[in-house]
Amino acid sequence: MLTEVGGIFVKIAFAHDADVVLARSLQGDTEEAFDLVSWSNTRSPATRKQVVRSFVQSKQSPFLIHQVARLKRKEATDCMKDYFSAGGDLKDIAEWLAAAGQILKTGAIPDDTDGFWGWVKKAASSVVDAVVGAINTVADAVKAAGKSLADAVSAVVSWTASKINDFVEAVLAAGKTVAQLLTEAVKKGAALLDKFVRGILAAGKKALDVINWAITQAAATLKNVLTTLEAALNSFTSLLLEVAKLATAQLKQVVSALLAAGKKVADFVERLSRLAYDTARSVVKILLEAGKSVADVIKAAIGKGRQLARIVLDGLLAAGKKIADALVALKNATVNAIADFIGALKDLGRALGSILVELVGLAQAVAIKMMQAIRKIWSATVDILQEAAARGIHVIKTVLVAILGTGIHLKNVLADIARDVREAFREGLIKGLLEIGKSALTLLKEAAKIAASVVAITFGLILSVLGSHRKLTSEERAEAAKVFGTSINLDMVRLTDANLASDLVMWLNKNRPFTTMYVINHGSGVKLKTDTLIQRNSPTSGRRSIQAGCT
């Protein structure tokens, strides 16, 4: 036991002043020092102050703090107040916290400090529990003394990263938040902030906690923190997975900061498949909002597969971009790579017709390449023809040029039109073929290679497209009525108005007039005589006819 006589500390049988007790403690008798501190709390405040002062003056403040950590809360608070009154500072408290933090990380007491920390083995069910309790005792005492552990950050600026990690571990265990620590660290400069970020991760805290704090800081600080996190996490993918947990507004802020830090569009796009779909699509939109072009985003996704193409296209379309924007950006890609994007559009519910519409305006060579890719996804030519025919002549012409440019022969296109395309769409396709430079004669020659039925259908369609017909004149009608009476509906009879290509007529009928249903056809520039138009009773057949084949 210790007693006090006239301000002099006496141990039964031996008289020792405080300095002697401290000297003995440093040689291993730590319990004697603890007895001294505990005893001082049972005496007068003046005695306690004198004991505390002895620790401070002998430069053994960390040793005092270690003993304070073992006291009851009230006693610890009184000693801590005396400590600061005697000139003690937070640096020594930081030193003690670093030592405590090291034990927290490992869960074991280092051999060289067993005498110093040996008491914790008996103080609780585990070493970690005992150390956490000690840390909180000190933290509460510091707070009660009007100080803050966060203020201790200024004392660790010159410390090594490893020692700062230990300090951070202890301060977090004392209940300080990530934001509180980083707010103090950033005041001391980027170098210390970097160490604290790493220390926080080493203490098991989430990178997202750090990111959420950094978002509230200046742009330069956010950029530096993100760079540190990427290095600490060992990959940009790991960082992006953390960033992806943010709300959209915060995500936009972080993506912009990462771009400012030197990240490329490809760094984001190549990792989109690893993110939740909606988040990945949001990243694409954010890249565009940050000033990156459609070409930048598309280029980064080329050759990376249909799934990534789908994410990128969905993001582009959600951002208000058009399919044509994507197709233009794909003009230099391979057909297989383009097919990934065409397939992705199909996955996104975009109809074939809506894709064909976007081919209008593209350079012919590009449109042909796009058609090659389209045929990989929609292999039936008839499907492509029908969708084009439903969209108007400009689309029809573009699609026909592209289809023929892919190597499909005109004969096969005509066969599809005559046999498989719905009747309502056939005329538009024939008109398109004529307008892209395929002559009527050429079409009929190709149809003749297929079958007579295809020739008939093709010819009828050509007539419908090219033929400008007129009704019978009053003189022609009067003559016809004399011969046929009411046996023919003369209102339905039409004559071609001399605008069907003469070479077509010459090839088909050796320049002789001929009929197709109620239409009387004749060569260009020819005016039919009445006796040619209206054939009276034939001396051989006894028949009468009008050159409409309608008798």
Image (cartoon, rainbow, N blue to C red):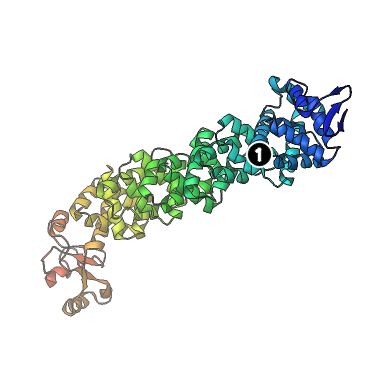
Q: Quadrant of the N terminus?
A: top right
Height in image: 262 above or below 523?
A: above
- Secondary structure at badge 1 equals loop
Q: Looking at the picture, how far across and down is residue 447, in whole percent?
A: 25, 49
On screen, residue 67 versus residue 507, left or right, reads right
Residue under numbered circle 1:
89
What residue sits 20% from the left and 69% below the top? 495
Q: Nearer the viewer, residue 432 or 368?
A: 368
- Asked whether, in this view, residue 472 is left or right of residue 294, the answer is left
Give the side of residue 374 with respect to residue 212, left or right.
left
The residue type indicated by label 1 comes to: Asp
The vertical placement of 13 against 346, above or below, is above
Q: Position of residue 249 (x, y in %)?
A: 52, 54
Residue for point 34% across, 45% down: 330
Name which quarter of the figure residue 266 lies in.
top left
Q: Which of 26 and 394 lies nearest the eye of the viewer?
A: 26
Q: Is residue 494 visible?
A: yes
Q: Along the line of sight, which residue is nearer the eye, 378 or 120?
A: 120
* Quarter assignment of residue 152: top right
Q: Residues within 10 Å of mark 1 (few under 14, many from 20)?
A: some
Where residue 369 sits in the image (x, y, percent)? 30, 44
The C terminus lies in quadrant: bottom left
